Image: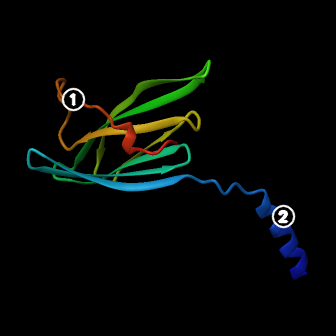
Amino acid sequence: MRIILFFFTSILLIGCDTSIRHSDYTDTTYKDGVMMTVNISIVNETAKFKCVESDTDNCFLKVSSKRCHQKEKTNICTIAELENFKLLVGEMKEFVGRDSNEQFAHCASANEFNVDDECRPNYNAYNTL
């Protein structure tokens, strides 16, 4: 019986995808004496943004996506702002990518963004989903 179970388990594992892409990091910022910590977890095509700690009890985020596709031997990329939102400490928001060429980046602040605040996500610092 154990041999049969081992055989079927081995067959099931052969079909499993072992190419899971994962990155997890925490970003702590200090702006105007106010501290905030955000955790970003990326697994395959899903990005999760979590407000870990904030002197104001809030994390304000702007999340953008860089979407690339190849057209006539040229890589064409567009940046789309997905959402501006507020998270309370402990809250999390999830974004699911369209395909494996989508990248997510964010700007974060412990205080609400002003209209004049610059927010330029750095896509070089984030993994491709």
Vertical comparison of 11 with 112: above or below: below
Q: Quadrant of residue 113?
A: top left
Vertical comparison of 72 with 64: above or below: above
The x, y position of residue 114, in whole percent, is 17, 28
Within 10 angstroms of label 2, few (less than 14), some, or many (20 or more) residues?
Answer: few
Please give the label number shown on residue 11. Answer: 2
Q: Is residue 29 left or right of residue 90?
A: left
Give SS at disc 1.
loop
Residue at 91% of width from left, 81% of height from top?
1
Amino acid type of the residue tagged 2 in the rendering: Ile
Q: Earlier in the sequence, mark 2 or mark 1?
A: 2
Q: Quadrant of residue 100?
A: top right
Within 10 angstroms of label 1, few (less than 14), some, or many (20 or more) residues?
Answer: few
- 35 or 103: nearer the viewer: 103
Amino acid type of the residue tagged 1 in the rendering: Glu
The x, y position of residue 66, in whole percent, is 45, 31
Tag 1 residue: 118
Residue at 52% of width from left, 44% of height from top?
46
The x, y position of residue 77, in whole percent, is 48, 25
The x, y position of residue 4, in whole percent, is 90, 75
Q: Is residue 77 left or right of residue 64?
A: right
Give SS at disc 2.
helix
Mark 2 and mark 1: Cα distance apart in space: 53 Å
Q: Quadrant of residue 75?
A: top right
Residue at 51% of width from left, 35% of height from top?
102
Please give the label number shown on residue 93. Answer: none
Q: Is residue 1 left or right of residue 19?
A: right
Residue at 73% of width from left, 57% of height from top?
16
Residue closest to the far front: 73
Vertical comparison of 68 with 72: above or below: below
Residue closest to the far bottom: 2
Vertical comparison of 46 with 8: above or below: above
